[in-house]
Amino acid sequence: MAKKPDLLPGTLDMLILKTLTRAPLHGYGIALSIKRISDEVLTVEEGSLYPALQRLLVQGWVKAEWKMTETNRRARYYTLTDEGRKQLGLEVSEFERMIAAIGRVLQDPQEA
Amino acid sequence: MSKLLLRLALLLRRDRFRSELDEEMVFHRAERQRELEAAGMSAKQARKTAALEFGNLEQLKERSTEAIGFRFETVLQDLRFATRQLRRNPGFAATAIFILALGIGASVAIFAFVDAALIQPLPYRDPARLVDVTESIQSYDVRANLSYPDYLDWKRRNTVFSSLDVYNGNGFLMNTPDGPKPMSGVRVSDGFFKTLGVTPVLGRDFRPGEDLPGTADIVILSYRGWKQISGGRADVIGTKVTLNGTPYTIIGVLPESFDFAPTGGAQFWTPFHAQPGCDLNRSCHNLNGIARLKDDITVAAALSQMQSVAAQLEREYPGSNRGQGAFVESLAEGLVGDYRPILLTLLAGAALLLVIACINVASLLLVRSESRRREFALRGALGASRTRLIRQFVAEGSLLTALGALLGVGAAYASMRLLRGLVPINMAWRMPFLRTVGLNSHVLAFAGVVATIALCLFAVSPMLRLPAASMREGLQEGGHGSAGRLWRRLGANLVTAELAVAVVLLCGAGLLGKSFYRLLHVEVNFHPDHLAMIRVFLPKPLYPNDQTVITLQQQILARVRALPGVQSAGMTTVAPLSYNGNTDWIRFVGRPYNGEHNEVNERDVTADFIPTLQARLLRGRLFTDSESLNVHKVVVINQKLADIYYPGQNPIGQHFGDDGLSPDSIKEVIGVVDNIKEGALDSEMMPAVYYPLFQSEDHLVTLIVRTSQSESSLLPTLATIIHSIDPGLGIVDPSTMEEYMRSSPTAYLHQSSAWLVGGFASVALLLAVVGLYGVIAYSVAQRTREIGVRMALGAPRGSVYAMVLKEAGWLTAIGISLGLIASVGAATLMRGLLFGTAAWDAGTLASVALVLGGAAMLASYLPARRAASVNPVQALRAE
């Protein structure tokens, strides 16, 4: 049975896109990268990662191609497209707006 | 656009997509395994952990595919699978589809009639502004016809109608090469068609003033009349047709679509041309009015103005207009209002049948989902997502519903045509809306809504049986613990509801059937068997005066009496059982009179009329034919008149006359006859006077003949005899009295509602009993092991019977009790349709309970027997 992602809904796509701004990566690499950068706070379940990647692929926000890894194995590398970069901008600003809004709600409970 | 292309590309390269996905995932697991090994895990342990972390590989793939796939692709898959499922179980599929088609078909067919009669607007211009306008008799609070002088005043004085017109029916004899043919006609005021907003398709409409006496004799043909007399030739305009011996110039032809229910299938429309006599008499009410409301006037406002106009006239003409009020209602109400209760009752009946059908199919689906629990648990384990499983139910439900609905609509179409064809022509003329009954957009939308509701029910009910937690349980062997009990409870509730609904339908059918029986057996106070009736029309030009009329009538009677088998024959102006009306106002000699209207049915009859009916003479004597011709005027009254106006007195020898007591009108009461039913079967008894026919002259009489032989075979003979006396006579409506009773509109409506609701009820009975059988049989199947254990422990077969029958008995008892309560409520709602039968008619309720209870016991006996014949050893070994 699928495990539930620990992420806020809707943020996985954004995290994947952001990770890919640094360099093209394969699926495992993306999961690893998110885990490391977030100091192991965010773990991306495979059950969510691959459907998400297919979704991004269909939207045209990422491209995929088969390459060899440093360890000489065939892996599918995902690259951010221009459209994906635009989408990332949109999602980040939307996300920040929401975080700010949540922050406001949490900060001033007395005034409410 | 590019996204669509991308998707299409992915769709076409699906296999590659899958293998790529596989490879990608294998890579992922390998990398994870390496990482774990690097952290110090053994290779075997690392591989296991990686695989566990990855989770359900198939489900993951499914979800990834879903992310890229087109919805319709999986929908098609679901549908294909659903088709396969249904095909594999044709008995189940056929039963479910058939039951559904039955329910949907019945309700759609009835709805089509409701739509045509009550929802679609009348086929006239701006029909919402049209009203029905007549006088009313305040003392009875019922509508009554208008008199022509009143109409002229109403027309002049009102400010609420943009136009007000009148019509009345009028029979004609048309000259044809084969002799005179009776045709039906209507006299209308000049603006009649303009008020309705109908324009002739050929020729012209009446012009203002053309309805005044002394103007040219012109006629407009109905479309049917046009086809009939000229075969539909356009050059018919300007030619003449001879009606009642007078040539009329044809000036127009009405559109084919034109129908006006109150005038039936009239072929000729002539201008009113008021005649001396009734037309010019303010107290002779023979007209019906229609009007078009001015733009900002409501029906209520129009009614209140017409009431004040009527009140003015009452002051101005206290003699004729005392108690004459006004009555205004929307034309739609006037034309179809009578059919509303019966149509709504039928729709309710069909809806109940649909409910039963849906419950039945839903329980079939439940049973099936129960037996498929393992299949679904397995599919879940193999990676089918929950949504996908639910979609599977929806797909199966959709397929069933779509097939059921399609078949149902087809059946509805067929039954619409059948039902329409079954309506006798004399009834069809009164219901022009029948012509518009069909599969129009309203009806199809209704079918769509019904199917959607059914679909929701069918998709949801098996889903109830799919809680996430039960999947694992479903995989376990056996698995009919709590779930089986849950279904049994649910199924039991459904079947109770089903039985209750069946009781309501059965009671409805029983009450309507009883009403119909009561109606046909209502006390008419004469013997309706062995009576033949025929109406004879004497054209005025051929029989211009009393003497010629009387001679002819006597001649006809003499010839008819000489026929073999004929016991007696008489004539009347208005046939019994036709209507209350053609009334007279009487005033009693020697009593104070303050202008009140003593309204009585007036019938002019020959001496033999009452003996022919075999109605009882209660007092005094009847008149004789020779006396009929005397100057001395006599009258026979009915018992009702005696009860009302001569309470506790002997009316014989008393005198009364018209409201002015003109010397010519004074008559002596010589006899009191039993209350012969003059009005429709379900009407109230009214006081009546029987005058000698030969003391009046009348041009349309009904000949009634009592024979000892078959009365129906006498009818053609009567026609031949009348025509052999004078081929110029018109003959209308030959019928036996019993046929006449059965085919009267009242009887017809009672009969058809009883038959239709009876049909619904029998299907409902069948479905409910089958439903009960299903629940009990399922319960027995689930408890085979338990029963086996009981029997192994020494329970006698009798106790097993008792156990099963008790379960069924409870369900039936609860269902029937609930149903009986609901029935009394439902019957109270439709009490307007009942005749001589109370809503809580104990006999009907008891018989329904007995029939349903008996059928239910029979249905549960079969599973009980199966339970009792369980072999304990086999039952225990089976699991």
Image: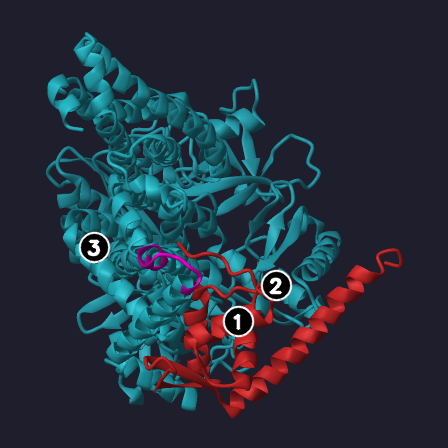
Q: Amino acid at mark 1?
A: Ser
Q: Amino acid at mark 3?
A: Gln
Q: Amino acid at mark 2?
A: Tyr
Q: Secondary structure at mark 3?
A: helix
Residue A105 vertical position relative to residue B106 in the rendered view, above or below: below
Residue indicated by mark 3? B85
Asked whether residue B548 is in view, the answer is no
Name the quadrant containing residue B536: bottom left
Residue B668 image point, x, y percent: 50, 32
Q: Residues within 10 Å of mark 1 (few under 14, many from 20)?
A: many
In the rendered view of the protein, which quadrant contains the N terminus of chain B? bottom left
Q: Colour of chain A?
A: red
Marks 2/1 same chain: yes
Name the quadrant containing residue B571: top left
Q: Earlier in the sequence, mark 3 or mark 2?
A: 3
Q: Secondary structure at mark 2?
A: helix
Numbered circle sitting on residue B151: 2
In front: mark 3 or mark 1? 3
Stretch in magenta? B38-47
Residue indicated by mark 1? B189
Q: Residues within 10 Å of mark 2 (few under 14, many from 20)?
A: many
